[in-house]
Image: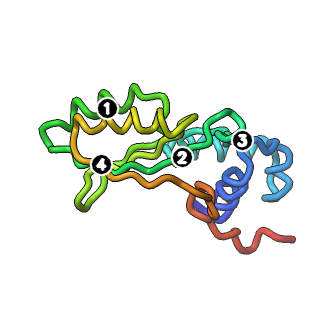
Amino acid sequence: MDKIDKELLRLLTENARMPLNQLAQKVFLSSPAVASRIEKLEREGIIQSYTTKVDYLKLGYPITAFINLEVQPQQKQSFYSYIESCPNVLECDCVTGRYSMLIKVAFPSTQELDSFIGQLQTYGNTETQIVFSTPVESRGIQLMPAEGLQH
C-alpha cells in the first residue's frame, strides 16, 4: 500500500460516497486508475464494506448503553447465535477482563433495555452503563494525510 492508497482510504473514511472524479482529483490520478486502486483494496480485504451513519435518536432510539456480560466458555456458541439475532445490538465484542463480552445497544426506552438485560442474564452476570453523551463518535483509525500529494 503506497501513499496514494492511504490517501484514498482517508478520503473514503471521511466520506464513502465521494464521487470517483472527486477522489481522482484529490490524489492527482485518473478516475479509472482510482477505481482500479479501490477495487484492489476491496479484493485485499482492506476495504470491507461501506456503511451509513444513522442518528438513532431521530429514529426513536434515545437510549444507548454498553453492557458487560460474563459468559462461560461453554455457553459462547449458544450466546453468539442468540446475540446475532438481536436487532437492538449495534456491536458485540469478546474482550479480556472480568466480563467476556462488551455489547453496545440502542433502545427506545429504559424499560426495553431492562427487559433485554434480563434476557442476557440467562448467560451470566451483567454490568450496564447508559450513555449520556458521545464526545467522539465511532470512527476508523485516523490515517494521516499522505505526504507529497498536495500540489
Mark before the other along the chain sequence, 4 or 2: 2
Q: Do callouts 1 and 3 mark residues in contact (Cβ within 8 Å)?
A: no
Decide which of tag 4 and tag 3 comes sooner along the chain.
Answer: 3
Question: Disc 2 or disc 3, which is closer to the eye?
Answer: 2
Q: In which quarter of the image is the N terminus?
A: bottom right
State whether residue 129 is above or below residue 71: below
Name the side, left or right, on which 30 lies relative to 118. right
Residue 151 image-quadrant placement: bottom right
Which of the two labelled residues, at mark 2 and mark 1, occupies the earlier sequence position? 2
Residue assigned mark 3? 35
Task: Check disc 3 and report its element: helix, strand or loop.
Answer: helix
Q: Which SS class for mark 4?
A: strand
Q: Where is residue 139 in the image (x, y as percent from the top left)?
A: 60, 56
Neighbour class for label 4 at 10 Å: few (<14), some, many (≥20)? some
- Can you tell which mark lies on residue 64? 2
Q: Secondary structure under badge 1?
A: helix
Mark 4: which amino acid?
Thr
| Residue underneath mark 4 | 126
- The type of residue carrying mark 3 is Ala
Mark 2 or mark 3: whose residue is earlier in sequence: 3
- Name the residue that disc number 1 marks: 119
| Marks 1/3: CA–CA distance | 46 Å
Marks 4,1: beta carbons within 8 A? no
Amino acid tagged 1: Gln
